[in-house]
Amino acid sequence: MPEGHSLHRLAGQLAELVGHDVAATSPQGRFDAAAVDGSRVTDIQAYGKHLLLETSAGLSLHVHLGMRGKWLRFSPVTGPALKQVRLRLATSDLAWDLIAPSTCELLAADGRRALLASLGPDPLRPEADRDEARRRLQAYRGSVGAALMDQAVAAGVGNVFRAEILHALGIAPSRPAREVGDEEFAALWLRLQAMMTQGVEDGRIITVDAPSGGTRTDVPEDQSRRVYKQSACYDCGTPVVTTTLSGRTSYACPRCQPA
Ligand SMILES: [Zn+2]
């Protein structure tokens, strides 16, 4: 599933629609495109793993990509959208096609408010309140590994960032969330902001060092992380241990992240 960095990067790319009147269609027929067809896009923002596109029709388009969703960009537009496209947003010279999202819906102001109220602070958003994220994490009844996957604690963190940030801080995923100290959380949040910001820039999650004489993005995808889906810890070589937390496989180094 795309993590928060992907959505923030997408929001930056989709921002080219802001200020334009868009033709909205749903070739698949599973979205009420007529409600926003011909309206002007006034803003687009990512909140955690959610995208909110504002329109002059007074409605917000809410998209969550889920496991398989994606946006495809066409410029120039060479033909009609494929029939599986849930939503095409087109200007006179380009089109963005949304395919297989888990959510594509229109929200009025109250629905938009409720969505944002359901999300915890997003480390990639400038207004994110670190103390609020800390309170939510420390109040979580479960492990820190599970807490970080809860979008009501910190929005945008997924399985890769969970594994890599806990490894970076030397915290075992199984440690109770309430036992994460204030200073420890402050360090975690700062590191998470840096890691996710780098992810927006790279378009990938790369936590290992750049190879000598090369750049970060030269690192092959399957070797880009220190513990996530690795057999041995990048830092110390100890075999990585996996467990299941919040229904997803958790990766940790027992030496760098002692229980
Ligand atoms: Zn290690």
Image (tube, grey):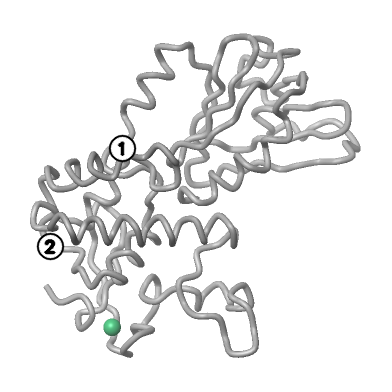
- Mark 2, residue position: 175
Question: Taking 223 as reference, is 75 above or below it?
Answer: above
Q: Which mark is residue 144?
A: none
Identify the residue at image location x=53%, y=21%. Answer: 105
Query: Mark 1 vs mark 2: which is more N-terminal?
Result: 1
Q: What is the number of callouts on the image?
A: 2
- 244 vs 39, left or right, is left
From the viewer's side, name the closer residue of 101 and 106. Answer: 106
- Mark 1, residue position: 120
Identify the residue at image location x=59%, y=21%. Answer: 54
Q: Amino acid at mark 1?
A: Gly
- 172 vs 52, left or right, is left
From the viewer's side, name the closer residue of 192 and 118. Answer: 192
**Secondary element at image label 1:** loop
Where in the figure is residue 252, as x and y percent of width and height?
27, 73
- 74 vs 240, left or right, is right
Where in the figure is residue 55, as x and y percent of width and height?
63, 17
Q: Label 2 neighbourhood size at 10 Å, few (<14), some (14-19), many (20+)?
A: some
Identify the residue at image location x=61%, y=44%. Answer: 10
Which image quarter has ligand 1? bottom left
Q: Quadrant of residue 92?
A: top right
